[in-house]
Amino acid sequence: MVRRRQQELQVIALLEVNQAAGALARKLVTDGPIPTKAAVDALHIAVATVHGVDYLLTWNCKHIANAEMQGKIEAVCRINGYEPPVICTPEGLSGE
């Protein structure tokens, strides 16, 4: 099972943490709902957003997959010229 997972992960592209992602992450903290102590979570969202990812799957429901923060996260992304990904837990994407 582990070997199969490793093989599957080899075809997944790694996304670059670039200047645009850093700038958007700062905006998510300064202008948005993400607290300073969760700046890494803001960067996670920003990298996915800047690279045009359709879905951001996470089990982090405190600062990322949080319904109370979702609208504010989306607003900051859009104000800065990006379409945010759909943020949800893997269970939320299962379609069941």
Image: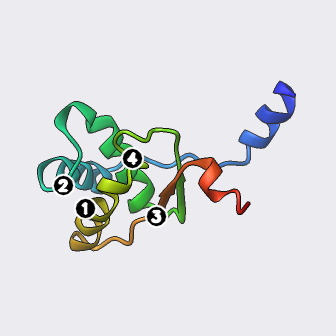
Measure how far apart labels 1 and 3 are at the Cα level: 13 Å
Horizontal side, residue 68 vs residue 56: left or right? left
Horizontal side, residue 32 vs residue 70: left or right? left
Query: Is 85 or 6 nearer to us in this picture?
Result: 85
Element type where label 4 sits in the image: loop
Q: Nearer the viewer, mark 4 or mark 3?
A: 4
Measure how far apart labels 4 and 2 are at the Cα level: 12 Å
Would residue 38 be seen by someone viewing this image from the given angle?
yes
Q: Tell me the colour scheme of the image.
A: rainbow
Query: Is 20 or 77 nearer to us in this picture?
Result: 77
Badge 4 local density, few (<14 within 10 Å), some, or many (20+)?
A: many
Count of marks, rendered view:
4
Q: Earlier in the sequence, mark 1 or mark 3?
A: 1
Element type where label 1 sits in the image: helix
Q: Check contact, mark 4 vs mark 3: CB within 8 A.
A: no
Residue at the extreme left: 30
Q: Check contact, mark 1 vs mark 2: CB within 8 A.
A: yes
Q: Earlier in the sequence, mark 1 or mark 2?
A: 2
User: Residue at label 2?
Assistant: 32
Q: Earlier in the sequence, mark 2 or mark 3?
A: 2
Quadrant including the N terminus: top right
Up-down relation of residue 27 to residue 14 (above or below): below
Residue at screen point 30% across, 45% down: 42
User: Residue at label 4?
Assistant: 64
Badge 2 local density, few (<14 within 10 Å), some, or many (20+)?
A: some
Measure how far apart labels 2 and 3 are at the Cα level: 16 Å
Measure how far apart labels 1 and 4 are at the Cα level: 11 Å
Give x and y (percent) for residue 28: 22, 52
Residue at screen point 30% across, 65% down: 71
Badge 3 local density, few (<14 within 10 Å), some, or many (20+)?
A: many
Horizontal side, residue 25 vs residue 16: left or right? left
